[in-house]
Image (spheres, helix red, strand yellow):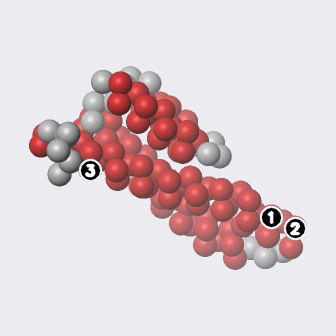
Amino acid sequence: MNEHQPAQDQPASSTLKTLTTVGYLEGTSFLLLLCIAMPLKYMMGIPEGVKYIGMAHGVLFIAYIVILMGAANKIKMPIWAMPAGVMGSFLPFGPFIFDHLLKKSLSKN
């Protein structure tokens, strides 16, 4: 345990770490889908990348939204965070930017 972090903040810290990890995985899978799998399918006729990366991205997207909803209550996110997190999951680099802004906002409190 961090000496500067009270014991009651440990579940919130764990929840934020889980949200960050799944958000980074979801964002990375989206970028792989957009930048590698889709060009392979439409420019080279190789559809397998979209099939597998698309499936992984779909699972990660659902997991991210579920974890985001749970985290919104556990870590007392600001009112803007839930819609921003959902909107960010639809944009390239969105989860990375959202994570940065959320952590910046939470550190002010």
Query: Left or right: 31 with respect to 96?
Result: right
Q: What element carries label 1?
A: helix
Q: What element carries label 3?
A: helix
Q: Residue at x 62, y 56 (%)?
A: 30
Query: Left or right: 8 with respect to 108?
Result: left
Mark 2 packing: few (<14 Cα in 10 Å), some, or many (20+)? few
Q: Which of 32 and 7 is in front in this view?
A: 7
Q: Residue at x 80, y 64 (%)?
A: 39
CB atoms at circles 2 and 1 under 8 Å apart? yes
The quarter of the picture where residue 68 lies is: top left
Q: Can residue 49 be seen in this view?
A: yes
Residue 18: horizontal and vertical position, in percent? 35, 53
Mark 1 packing: few (<14 Cα in 10 Å), some, or many (20+)? some
Residue at the extreme right? 43
Circle 2 residue: 43
**Mark toward the start of the polypeptide (3 vs 1):** 3
Q: In this view, does 31 lie above or below 42?
A: above
Circle 1 residue: 39
Instruction: Inspect the image, locate mark 1, and give the three-letter code of the amino acid beneath it.
Output: Pro
Quarter of the C terminus within the rendering: top left
Instruction: Inspect the image, locate mark 3, and give the three-letter code of the amino acid beneath it.
Output: Ser
Q: Which mark is residue 54?
A: none
Q: Residue 14 carries which label?
A: 3
Q: Which residue is drawn at 28% across and 30% down?
A: 76
Q: Is residue 67 visible?
A: no
